[in-house]
Structure formats: structure tokens, C-alpha cells
Amino acid sequence: IRVIQGDGIDINSLEKVLKTMKNANWAADNLAFGSGGALLQKLHRDTQKCAFKCSYAVVNGAGVDVVKDPITDPGKKSKAGRLTLEHKAGKWTTVTEGKGDASTDQLVEVFVNGELRMDDSFSTIRKRSEELSVAPHKLWMPEVETAKADPFGSILLLTDSYKVTHHLQYPPGTETIYSYFESRGGAYEEVCFFGLQYFLKRYLAGPRVTPTLIDEAESYFSKHFAHPVWGYDRKLFHREGWQHIVEQHGGRLPISIKAVPEGTVVPYKNVLFTMENTDPACYWLTNYLETLLVQVWYPTTVCTQSREQKKIIKKYLVDTGCQDVIDSGGDMFKLHDFGF
């Protein structure tokens, strides 16, 4: 028989149904699943406790480790220093740079000064999620479009309000801000990293800052930060910083990002990507971009949970004598996205 079950399916009910079929001596190949809200919407940033934190800075030429360690929540303690993600003898470990074996570092350069350096196909990413070794596809001359005039086309506006004023709060002499993204824990011990490449192509690659966008942003923030009595303080918006990017970098963002290749499965509590400014005058830019890039939590969490469901389906296919379904690729058609 062939049945598709689409109501009330999530990772827990899926396994319950398959277990019931196994106990009744039915082959798992008789059933496929459709999942809507549970696959795409019943998730949040704390499902895998995703976070983006500063861990290193250069101030007046001296390197400084930065760490957060709140006494009320030890689980939010952040990592310190410049980081590497090392893979050795089957074990993944996040190490402060200089304290491990840099030759085993799995973080690769994916974005530098407005240029995309890696461009992996979805099939390549999927193979990595199956824990196959696939080299990243290097892309040295990316074809990207300049930001268009749309509500999400201005990188100057894609941030939290309070970050607009952060340039005033860094210590004098700050030259470098280095931050990282990780899953601090969560529902699943293995994380399938996915989604950064989309954000780089959509929002960061190519010229992203223009005089027009600067004017539009200043006009918006002059209203947003205006006080009914004292008016607007012009120094709140860092116009000079954005003009520097236009004049010195042609509107390209002076940022370097290293990341684990997309689709790679890494134990949680490890660094997944790092970001730092490449122009000392743009130290403020690294964490200005946090608001946007921390959204990688969503595609990563969806893929992480989907992979866990795939593991459950494959287990019950094997347990009920359906190895041939896996060998022919039929397991790829057992869980369908009914959501949007």
C-alpha cells in the first residue's frame, strides 16, 4: 500500500507512527509524511541556542580577548579570542587560535571585502549533511547584483536600532572587532550548518553602500531617534563611517568571514562562522551586521531538525527490511514540506 500522512506530523509523532508500524510488522516503505508548521515554523532561535558574540578586539594596536560570562546563566558564557574549528581523529573542537593545530582548521574563507569566495550547489551541501567529504567550490569572480531599491535593499537599515549608535561606545583606538556565531546547545547535539551563503549573496556581496543609501538612512534615523524636546543628535548616525566605505572601498563592505562549509555536521557548542573587519576605520561594522547574519539560525535549525527526521526514517526503513529503498534513493521522498 502507499499512504501519506500529513496531519499533526512533527519529529516526535513521525517516530511514534514508524515505531507503531514496525511493531505491527509493516514495512516503513508503505508510508510517507508531509509536515508543514512543525517543519518550518515550530522553531525559534533558542531551539539550538544560536548566538553571535564578539570574542576578540584590537585596541591601540594590542589584542584583547572579549568574553561574556553572566552569573545568572552559565549557559550563555561566550568563547574568548580568535577561534579555529579543528577536526582531528573524528572529533570536532573549537580552539582559541594559537593553542591547537591550525592545519586541521575547518573554517574556510567565504567572503572578503565584498566578494563571495565560495559558491556551493545544494546537492554539494546535501552530500556534506550525509557526512561525506566534499571540497568547497571556490568562486573568485562572483556575479552579483548591486543592491536594488527595495525595503530590504539597504544594508544600512538591516540592523537593530541600538547598533546604529554603537560606533560611539567602542574604546578610543579600537581597530578590529572579531565575532563568531555558534549553537550554544539546544534540542539536537549535532548541527547541520546551512544558509550563510544565501545571506552573503542577497545582502553583502558586491557594492552595497551608495551616497543615496546613506542619505536615505540618515533621513530615516533622524526621525527614528528624534526627541520631542531636544530634537535629533546628528552624531548618532555614523555618516562619516559609511562615506568612508564608499570613498575607500567603492561601496563594498570591508569584512572577512570564515565559515565551516555549508552542510557540514558539527557538534553543538562549536564555532560555525567568524567575522571581522579588514579596515581599521570600520571596526564598528562587524557587529552592525550581527542583526542580519544571526538570522542564519533559522535555515540552520530547519536543516538540523530535518536531518534528525531523516535519520529516524532511515532507521525504520532498515529495521523493517527496506534497505533497498535507501540504496535506490527512495528515502529522499519520505518527508515532504507541506509548509510555506
Image: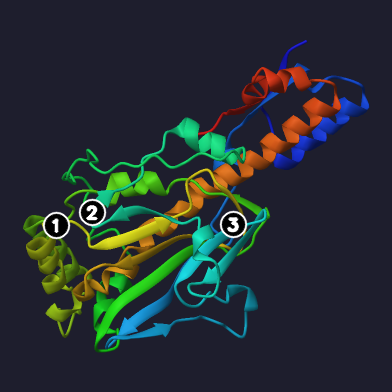
Amino acid carrying label 3: it is His
Q: Which residue is nearer to you in this view: 10 or 176?
A: 176
Residue at image position (38%, 72%) is: 178
Residue receiving disc 1: 251
Closer to the N terminus: mark 3 or mark 2? 3
Left or right for 118, reference 5: left
* Labels 1, 3: front one: 3
Q: Looking at the picture, does residue 282 appear above or below residue 293?
A: below
Closer to the N terminus: mark 2 or mark 1? 2
Closer to the N terminus: mark 1 or mark 3? 3
User: For numbered disc 3, what is the local secondary structure?
Assistant: strand
Q: Looking at the picture, does residue 292 appear above or below residue 26?
A: below
| Residue 40: percent from left, percent from top | 55, 41
CA separation in Å, label 2 and label 1: 8 Å
CA separation in Å, label 1 and label 3: 36 Å
User: For numbered disc 2, what is the local secondary structure?
Assistant: loop
Q: Looking at the picture, does residue 1 appear above or below residue 291?
A: above
Left or right for 2, reference 212: right
Asked whether disc 2 touches disc 1, contact meaning CB atoms under 8 Å apart, the reply is: yes
Count residues near mark 3 (Cα–Cα under 10 Å), then give few for <14, some for 14-19, many for 20+.
some
Residue receiving disc 2: 114
User: For numbered disc 1, what is the local secondary structure?
Assistant: loop
Q: Residue furthest top?
A: 1
- The mark tally for this picture is 3
| Residue 23: percent from left, percent from top | 92, 28
| Residue 300: percent from left, percent from top | 52, 48
| Residue 319: percent from left, percent from top | 85, 28
Residue at image position (23%, 53%) is: 114
Residue 87, disc: 3
CA separation in Å, label 3 and label 2: 29 Å
Q: Which residue is nearer to you in this view: 295 or 268?
A: 268
Amino acid carrying label 2: it is Gly
